[in-house]
Amino acid sequence: MRECISVHVGQAGVQIGNACWELYCLEHGIGQDGVRKGEENLLLASDPSLGTFFDETPSGKVVPRCVMIDLEPSVIDEVRTGAYKNLYHPNQLISHKEDAANNYARGHYTVGQEIIEETLDRFRRLADSCSSLQGFLLFHSFGGGTGSGFTSLLLQQLEQEFDKKSRLGFIIYPSPCVSTSVVEPYNAVLSTHSTLHNVDCAFMMDNEATYDICQRKLNIERPSYNNLNRLISQVVSSITASLRFDGALNVDLTEFQTNLVPYPRIHFPLTTYSPIMSNAKAFHEGMSVAQITAECFEPSNQMVKCNPRTGKYMACCMLYRGDVMPKDVNSAIASMKIKSNVQ
């Protein structure tokens, strides 16, 4: 068994985590109380890869291998009282009395220091329950005080305690068009510096790009954070699918690092997702492997607002999910290589 522990820090991290675990439960046939239901789920019950993200209790209930942390209680309280309140272990939901007030220094040096030991103790217990811990998946934003300051403090401690374990990040970068605070750029710069040394691979996303995808591709007139989080959870689910399900070509955490990181400090890959379409179109359109592959290189499908066509790709990792033939994939990638706009 190669277990992964998910770490959700700050408001963005916890809310994305809530959306991700809801989706994982639907994909694995797990109810809101952590109990598998239905005859078809007996097949999933015998699936050993389920234990990568879930821990099974003697009573047959499954518990996520995750820790949710925030310096103020309101967001964690939503999880404690929400639809999936019986899914999580109460000790894995850690909150404090006062928030970081969008201040990196408060999250890293003052308020964050008060709960770091309790948090690390929870990680030690979770790691002890794993037979072969593979690494950590971190979910947080760079704009908030907790997501930036406390995460960098936590990463320093995790590197000391779990030096040989992989650390992958799913990072929400601030963007000027969808901004909640004037100090987001400062938090992002300070947090990025700590990520250079303490994270092995960081998948980047930003609110502006996901907001545009919701408007243009999913036809949502005024997307809420709930819509953004559900879209991000779909992307995360697809990246982690090979960790959670058995397959012919499974990828583990170290392989992401090997395939996508040309130099240790350049470990911030772009994330793109395809196909993205609204419910109304989903049952009326069919897309070939070649079309899906081509869409992955379109800027409109990126989770970050930038134009990669002005530079060159140093590394690329394509993850296909579903009934896809390797022959079709090879021909689709061969046709992409001869296009002048993808280099």
Image (cartoon, rainbow, N blue to C red):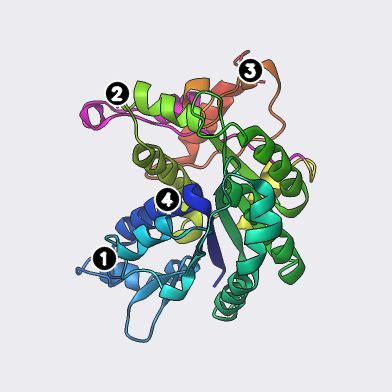
Q: Amino acid at mark 1?
A: Gly
Image mark for residue 221: 2
Report the disc number at residue 309: 3
Q: Secondary structure at mark 4?
A: helix
Residue in the foreground of this view, choosing between 303 and 51: 303
Residue depicted at x 33% and y 67%: 44
| Residue density around tag 3, few if under 14, some if 14–19, many if 20 or more, within 10 Å | some
Which of 14 and 242 lies nearest the eye of the viewer?
A: 14
Disc 3 is placed on an element classified as: helix
- Nearer the N terminus, badge 2 or badge 1? 1
Which quadrant of the structure image shows residue 38?
A: bottom left
| Foreground: disc 2 or disc 1 | 2
Disc 1 element? loop
The nearer-to-camera label among 3 and 4 is: 4
The residue under label 4 is which amino acid type?
Answer: Gln
Name the residue nearer the viewer: 330 or 296.
296
> Upstream in the sequence, badge 3 or badge 2?
2
**Residue 321 visible in the picture:** no
Q: Which residue is identified by label 4?
A: 15
Q: Position of residue 130 (x, y in %)?
A: 56, 77
